[in-house]
Amino acid sequence: MEQPTKRILSGVQPSGDLHLGNYLGAIKNFVSLQHEYECFFCVVDLHAITVWQDPATLAQKTREVTAAFIASGIDPKQNTLFVQSQVPQHSQLAWAFSCIARIGWLNRMTQFKDKAGKNSENVSVGLYSYPTLMAADILIYLATHVPVGEDQKQHLELTRDIAQKFNNDFKNDLFPIPEPLILGEAKRVMSLRDGTKKMSKSDSSDYSRIMLSDSKENIIQKIRKAKTDPLPLPENLEDAKKRPEAMNLLTIFAALSNTDTEKIILDYAGKDFSKFKNDLGDLVTSKISPISSEMSKLMNDKYFLDSIINSGKEKAISVADPVLKKVNEIIGFLSR
């Protein structure tokens, strides 16, 4: 089987409204990667149901993520844009991988411990085992690279371990060992109310996050109310790192302006936050408002969105199915 050299798989969960962290941490990078790699971008609805989802809301949010991909600049003709659950090869390969992965490997996954907390006995089996599904998502397309945030690096290591063990166990070289891509500024966007916590749709305060659906007025108000300390803006990167709220706003500015944080620090060194927040508000609205407007148009055209999703499904299956057939042959399953 021919091996790709520069193929990417990545996805976004349809588990809530999209915010600035989703855009800067994932979608914005997808837009730039499409010019350098063969890209498979999916709405990972199978991962979303590891916790309870309202069915009608899940369907709505699945289309919304698809709309966000397109509105942000991802070309559905150039890339494979699809919904995970519509490609059954993901789940089939995930079962094979659950028989390759070791319990000890999954027990070391810190993100499960963080999400389960003290209720680990009552969470779904899917939440515990979903790193094997993530491995299947990646390897069913023989992806060579995966854009990941800091909190996903451990899961990619598990994917690499599974690929290596499969290749070794069955004495073949079917699966590549995918490499991580950690790109650009604002790899992890933090809360506007607490610079030590990740921006999250589950935060009780609406002022902790900027939603892609926020109006221009709401964005500017949230930036103005973003928590900062009483000191002027830091003079250098070392000082900024000691001030999490300031550092968060500076890295957001850098990411949206496609520059590095140190340059932004130098531009605003020693200045008051009021001027900086005005400039940041203008920058955020100039980038997010057009996306929000285009998303709204797309969401009002369900036929067009569903045609994009269906086309992406067919493209994804055309790549995934031959890989699954090869896996079945290697394992010893009878051919379909």
Image (cartoon, grey):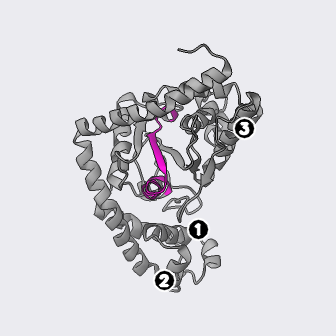
- Residue 113 location (% of width, % of height): 67, 40
Question: What span is in magenta?
Answer: 25-47
- Residue 99 location (% of width, % of height): 69, 24
- Binning the other alpha carbons within 10 Å of mark 1 as few (below 14), some (14 to 19) or many (20 upward) gives many
Q: Residue at x 42, y 56 (%)?
A: 31
Q: Quadrant of residue 293?
A: bottom left
**Residue assigned mark 1:** 244
Amino acid at pointer 3: Gln
Name the N-terminal-most of marks 2 and 3.
Answer: 3
Q: Residue at x 29, y 49 (%)?
A: 295
Q: Residue at x 54, y 50 (%)?
A: 6
Disc 2 from disc 1: Cα separation: 16 Å
Say which quadrant the N terminus sits in. top right
Which one is closest to the eye, mark 2 or mark 3?
3
- Binning the other alpha carbons within 10 Å of mark 2 as few (below 14), some (14 to 19) or many (20 upward) gives some
Indicate whether 135 appears above or below 31: above
Amino acid at pointer 1: Pro
Foreground of the two, 162 or 69? 162
- Residue 157 location (% of width, % of height): 69, 45
- Residue 79 location (% of width, % of height): 40, 46
Specify whether residue 295 is painted magenta.
no
Name the N-terminal-most of marks 2 and 1.
Answer: 1
Q: Quadrant of residue 275?
A: bottom left
Which one is closest to the eye, mark 1 or mark 3?
3
**Residue assigned mark 3:** 164
**Residue assigned mark 2:** 268
Specify whether residue 30 is painted magenta.
yes
